[in-house]
Image (cartoon, grey):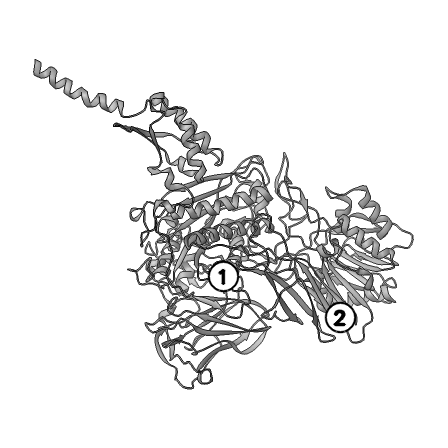
């Protein structure tokens, strides 16, 4: 009996000890409340629970609290740790108030989650002695504190795929709010994020086609199906066979067929004497003038050199580049985007064997343009019948020479899964052979980070925002990358980018923008890459409140800039480097005729969020006629005089440069000085609008109204797939849209209309200069020196920023603009004002006032008479009013690649005694233009007259009327 009692007593001892080894559940609840309240100061949603607590014994008791993963969603900084510990201590039992305290989130000490601590590991994720894949020798911007020598792998979520169950090519996400995620995220990456990173010096690699052109042709040393020309010229060293390579032998390919195994490459020894170099060149026919992506392929050999010298023979001048052929062999390597004239070109691209190193140079194929999908799937051997840029990565990676291990992880049975699996495996293939992936045979490219841009699902029935979510993964390989750096660096990348994005959106667009969690989860795209990786769900493509912003090109620019800044800061921290953010585009750009020279002036733009983003110098790019811009010239100040050949149209754009890189381009300003001029014209580009389509939230209908105003893209838009057809706020399919425009490139604001107008003005015998809206509003332009002022208003109209929480922008006639035009007219000047909504904006916009309407009547002599929806776009001039004979012009009314669409035009009504209607819309016979003794006011944009001869005749007639 005593033994039994003793045995029971001994059994009870550990139970009592265990009971004392953790905090009571009631205390757990209090701690969970404290932690949840702390979390929600920065992060939307999420509730922290306590998994367990442990109390250690001894001279210095220690309390360990293990919280759920939600505690890790918070963006910790050094000061947050002490604050959090203090708040937790306040709810601990008094006897533990002085104990050592440790907090864990999902098993990790919260100290390891603090930004800048590298996950508690000393090792950074860096590469030694990097020679970049591509060095742009012709660029006048060579960043020292940006992203030079860094390599970034990124992708724009999904793309069109073959769906085995449906037996058809399909989008991977629903068609909502005029777009689909497969194309929507691409509208951030291609026009904005990639150029920003490249202008900061980075080499950017994508697993999807980056060219938006349907045209594509291949030039190769092996005879193929393209009618192109490859030539070699040997001097000291002869070109020889270099092994297996690319050949374009067929139009379409079955899965698993690798075109990089169909042909051969060429190889030559490097030469250090420029006079004895050997060359190879690629030439052919360019079908239409424009900007084309240029890709090259080559093979990597043990003796490959790091400075293979390529020249792209583009319109406006040659561009020279060096390619490190020790990496990137056997795939398409994009050299960049270049403008080519239409017609036959003996040399589009060339390579020579000059090098400061001993070794070999290899040459294979050159790819010009993007092309159509050429991988067929299914029993009927169907291709997507879409431009390649619309397709998922699975198909591009096959076309670019990657193995089935990369793009066919399911044996070809499930393209949906293979598509998302292919992207992270592509990253590892790129890294194969580098110090961070040494055991894999790959492309030897030192990828510093990988980034996946997605948009999420989720809907709110009011103006609430779902917001931005970041996903990373630390769970593989014992939490370390090869080389010993912590996989928590992926969290640091996530934190840097999310913090930048949320901060900028709140400041510029939506104060209530939500920061969601930072999830440490085993998503395939986040888990597999062997480098710091972030999967960013930037916003919800299903939520109307967010898509009002998401369809705005300005929002896309600013979000992309925020992502770039986050990446820059992360990489700078890894390399222990002072970072500098590239400047914003310049403003107040103008050209003035001074004697027979032209004075160009501009001002830098201030970035109120980044003090480092100031300009050190500028680059002036020049175009003569309608060709391409030259390689630029460096300018130290904010003005200079340029000499022009008389009678020729010159165009200019400016970029701002600092140690962090080069800004986006300014708008294009243009000028022509005639030898014998009939007069002088100042062209004012008052059309600086980019915006989402008109939208409304009403009780009975919610959505975008393209028939009123389809918005304005930045240069071109690739996200639009079709009009919305479900406006019912109670419908589960609210926002559902057509896709009849899918993969069509839609023209937006080219910011190049001064040259378009100017060419017609010059053809009429007038000299002209031009200026931006901002330059006029700032008082930089003396219009009194010009006989006529041509004011381009395009689709300018007052536009809300999202739900207008941050106000409006793009007002057509601001106070400053009205004052400038009014002063000019009072001095005897003559004006041409054109635009489809500028006059209506002055009368009916949310910012319109009685003073605006009075100015319209008293100064311009007109009033707004309503809107006209031009069914056919024909506008007729009445005989004897503008010219001896009547004439007609036709404007663009449909969405397309050539010009922005005109949905509605202003009806202009004369009110002064000396004003008269001189043009009418054919379909309604309403007034399209009014002439007064000092001006012609048009209810449609001149640049929407697409036929050059019509536009030339039209402006010649206007100028003759005003200056006779």
Q: Nearer the viewer, residue 927 or 494?
A: 494
Picture quadrant of residue 670: bottom right
- 327 relative to 168, above or below: below
> Can you tell which mark lies on residue 133?
none
Q: Residue at x 59, y 38 (%)?
A: 728
Tell me if 231 is positioned left or right of 797 in this view.
left
Query: Is residue 629 in sight in this rendering?
Result: yes
* Disc 2 to disc 1, C-alpha distance: 43 Å
Q: Residue furthest top?
A: 1
Q: Secondary structure at mark 2?
A: helix
Residue 654 placement (x, y as % from top left): 63, 63
Q: Secondary structure at mark 1?
A: loop
Q: Residue at x 65, y 40 (%)?
A: 804
- 263 relative to 520, above or below: below
Residue 266 placement (x, y as % from top left): 38, 78
- Quarter of the image where the C terminus is located: bottom right
Q: Residue at x 41, y 69 (%)?
A: 324
Residue 450 placement (x, y as % from top left): 42, 54
Per the image, the residue denoted by label 2 is: 762
Per the image, the residue denoted by label 1 is: 144
Residue 892 placement (x, y as % from top left): 69, 59
Q: Residues within 10 Å of mark 1 (few under 14, many from 20)?
A: some
Query: Is residue 455 in sight in this rendering?
Result: no
Tell me if 192 is positioned left or right of 854 in this view.
left
């Amino acid at each position: 009996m005593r033994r039994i009692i003793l045995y029971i007593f001994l059994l009870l001892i550990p139970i009592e000890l265990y009971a004392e080894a953790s905090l009571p559940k009631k205390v757990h609840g209090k701690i969970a409340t404290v932690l949840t309240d702390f979390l929600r100061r920065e992060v939307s949603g999420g509730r922290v629970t306590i998994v367990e607590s442990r109390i250690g014994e001894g001279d210095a008791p220690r309390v360990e609290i293990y919280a759920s993963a939600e505690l890790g969603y918070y963006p910790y900084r050094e000061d947050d740790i002490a604050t959090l510990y203090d708040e937790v201590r306040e709810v601990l039992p008094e006897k533990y108030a002085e104990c050592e305290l440790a907090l864990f989130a999902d098993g990790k000490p919260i100290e390891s989650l603090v930004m800048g601590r590298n996950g508690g590991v000393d090792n950074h994720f860096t590469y030694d002695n990097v020679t970049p894949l591509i060095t742009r020798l012709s660029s006048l911007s060579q960043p020292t504190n940006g992203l030079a020598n860094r390599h970034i792998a990124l992708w724009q979520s999904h793309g069109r795929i073959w769906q085995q169950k449906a037996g058809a090519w399909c989008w991977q996400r629903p068609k909502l709010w005029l777009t689909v995620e497969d194309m929507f995220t691409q509208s951030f990456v291609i026009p904005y994020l990639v150029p920003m990173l490249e202008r900061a010096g980075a080499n950017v690699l994508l697993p999807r086609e980056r060219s938006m052109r349907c045209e594509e042709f291949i030039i190769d040393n092996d005879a193929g199906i393209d009618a192109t020309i490859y030539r070699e010229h040997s001097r000291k060293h002869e070109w020889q066979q270099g092994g297996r390579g690319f050949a374009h032998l067929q139009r379409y390919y079955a899965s698993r067929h690798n075109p990089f195994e169909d042909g051969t490459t060429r190889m030559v020894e490097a030469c250090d004497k420029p006079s004895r170099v050997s060359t190879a060149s690629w030439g052919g026919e360019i079908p239409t003038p424009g900007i084309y992506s240029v890709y090259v392929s080559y093979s990597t050999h043990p003796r490959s050199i790091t400075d293979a010298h390529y020249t792209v023979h583009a319109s406006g001048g040659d561009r020279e580049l060096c390619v490190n052929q020790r990496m990137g062999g056997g795939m398409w390597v994009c050299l960049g985007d270049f403008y080519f004239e239409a017609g036959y070109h003996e040399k589009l691209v060339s390579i020579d064997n000059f090098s400061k190193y001993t070794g070999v140079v290899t040459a294979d194929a050159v790819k010009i343009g993007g092309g159509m999908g050429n991988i067929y799937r299914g029993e009927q051997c169907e291709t997507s019948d879409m431009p390649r840029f619309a397709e998922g990565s699975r198909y591009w990676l096959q076309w670019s020479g990657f193995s089935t291990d990369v793009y066919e992880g399911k044996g070809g049975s499930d393209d949906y899964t293979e598509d998302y699996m292919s992207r992270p495996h592509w990253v590892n293939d790129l890294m194969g052979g580098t110090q961070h992936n040494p055991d894999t045979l790959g492309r030897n490219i030192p990828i510093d980070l990988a980034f996946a841009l997605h948009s999420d699902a989720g809907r709110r029935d009011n103006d609430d925002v779902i917001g931005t979510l970041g996903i990373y993964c630390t769970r593989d390989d014992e939490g370390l990358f090869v080389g010993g750096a912590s996989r928590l660096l992926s969290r640091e990348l996530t934190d840097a980018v999310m913090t930048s994005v949320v901060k900028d959106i709140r400041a510029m667009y939506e104060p209530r923008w939500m920061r969601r969690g930072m999830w440490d989860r085993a998503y395939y795209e986040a888990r597999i890459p062997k480098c710091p990786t972030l999967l960013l769900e930037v916003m919800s493509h299903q939520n109307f409140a967010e898509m009002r912003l998401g369809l705005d090109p300005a929002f896309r620019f600013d979000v992309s800039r925020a992502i770039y800044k986050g990446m820059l800061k992360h990489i700078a921290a890894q390399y222990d480097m002072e970072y500098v953010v590239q400047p914003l585009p310049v403003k107040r750009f103008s050209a003035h005729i001074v004697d027979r020279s032209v004075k160009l002036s501009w001002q830098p733009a201030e970035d109120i969020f980044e003090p480092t983003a100031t300009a050190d110098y500028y680059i002036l790019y020049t175009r003569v006629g309608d060709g391409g811009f030259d390689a630029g010239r460096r300018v130290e100040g904010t003005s200079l005089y340029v000499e022009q050949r008389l009678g020729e149209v010159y165009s200019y754009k400016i970029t701002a440069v600092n140690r962090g890189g080069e800004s986006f381009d300014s708008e294009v300003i243009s000028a022509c000085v005639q030898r014998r001029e009939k007069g002088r014209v100042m062209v004012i580009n008052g059309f600086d609008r980019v915006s989402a389509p008109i939208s409304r939230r009403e009780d009975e209908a919610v959505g975008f109204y393209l028939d009123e105003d389809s918005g304005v893209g930045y240069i071109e838009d690739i996200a639009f797939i079709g009009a919305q057809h479900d406006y019912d706020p109670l419908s589960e399919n609210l926002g559902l849209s057509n896709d009849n425009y899918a993969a069509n490139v839609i023209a937006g604001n080219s910011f190049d209309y001064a040259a378009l107008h100017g060419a017609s003005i010059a053809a009429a015998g007038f000299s002209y200069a031009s200026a931006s809206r901002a330059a006029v509003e700032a008082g930089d332009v003396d219009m009194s020196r010009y006989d006529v002022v041509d004011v381009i208003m395009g689709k300018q109209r007052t536009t809300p920023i999202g739900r207008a929480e941050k106000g409006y922008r793009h007002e057509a006639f601001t106070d400053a603009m009205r004052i400038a035009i009014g002063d000019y007219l009072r001095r005897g000047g003559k004006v041409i004002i054109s635009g489809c909504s500028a006059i209506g904006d002055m009368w009916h916009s949310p910012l319109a006032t009685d003073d605006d309407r009075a100015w319209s009547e008293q100064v311009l002599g007109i009033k707004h008479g309503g809107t006209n929806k031009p069914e056919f776009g024909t506008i007729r001039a009445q005989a004897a009013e503008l010219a001896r004979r009547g004439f007609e012009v036709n404007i663009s009314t449909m969405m397309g690649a050539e010009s922005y669409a005109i949905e509605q035009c202003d009806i202009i009504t004369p009110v002064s005694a000396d004003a008269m209607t001189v043009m009418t819309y054919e379909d309604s016979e309403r007034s399209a233009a009014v002439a007064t003794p000092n001006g012609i006011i048009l209810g449609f944009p001149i640049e929407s007259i697409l036929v050059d001869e019509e536009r030339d005749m039209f402006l010649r007639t206007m100028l003759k009327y005003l200056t006779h």
